[in-house]
Amino acid sequence: MQIAPHAALLVIDVQNDFTPGGQLAVPEGDLIVPLINRLSSLFKQVIVAQDWHPAGHASFASSHPGRKPYDVIQLPYGEQTLWPDHCVQATPGAEFHAGLDLPHAQLIIRKGCNPDIDSYSAFLEADRATTTGLAGYLKERGIDTVYMVGLALDFCVMFSALDARAAGFNAIVVTDACRAIDLNGSLAAAIERMQVAGVQLIPSSELI
Ligand code: VGL
Ligand code: ZN
């Protein structure tokens, strides 16, 4: 399969805290890095998403006395899974994985910066109202197709893919260039949700 002519690659949250040794390590999260580097060379437009929380963020279990990581609580915008502290702004855990090699990436989009609102998606925060501006950026550049890779397939990649579709883009997830957290069946649910929404799931062998 040829890369669509007006396409961008969105590399999601390949950061130290999501790779082995990090605070919210995704199993095998580091193994996708060489593949992402190879895929990136096929794209003129590369955008990198970075989870970027202030200390004391509402998604951290430590911000809610008596709560533990992976508890689910109600916040003003709905249900929120609580996480270990991770990707705190300007800490080593928030840095990109050292093996990520994307010199031609033109945009880094930071998300989850609002202390009271989480943002799995690179497009829209968890209140489903505050945008990151990414859809506008892509549209102004004439991009109609977004390929996605990174971490975690069942959280930030899935929500980014659903929001890309909702914003009118063709959304394609390269599944072997992703890894999942898989919390209580979240991986199978994510695949089902993406398929129903019209997100294409492809292996990298279709591109390389
Ligand atoms: C993510 C949980 C919390 C992700 C980010 O990148 O999938 N997951 N923050
Ligand atoms: Zn986060």
Image (cartoon, helix red, strand yellow):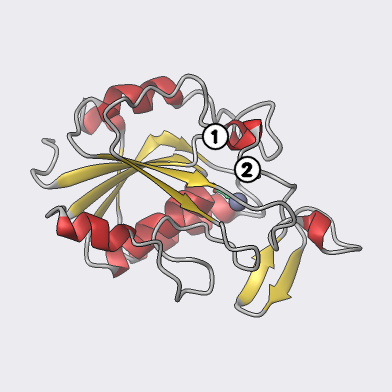
- Residue at (34, 62) in percent of width and height: 133
Residue type highlighted by circle 1: Gln
Q: Position of residue 101 (x, y in %)?
A: 38, 22
User: If the image is split into quadrants, where does the C terminus sit?
Assistant: top left
Q: Is residue 142 above or below residue 208?
A: below
The response on whether ligand 2 sits within 8 Å of label 2 is yes
* Residue 20 seen in this snapshot: yes
Rate crowding at label 1 as few (under 14), some (14 to 19) or many (20 or more) other CA atoms within 10 Å: many
> How far apart are labels 2 and 1 at the CA level?
8 Å
Residue type highlighted by circle 2: Cys
- Residue at (40, 61) in percent of width and height: 132
Q: Which residue is mark 2?
A: 87
**SS class, disc 1:** loop
Whether pointer 2 and pointer 1 mark residues with C-beta atoms closer than 8 Å, the reply is: yes
- Nearer to the camera, 198 or 55: 55
Q: Which residue is mark 1?
A: 15
The response on whether ligand 1 sits within 8 Å of label 1 is yes
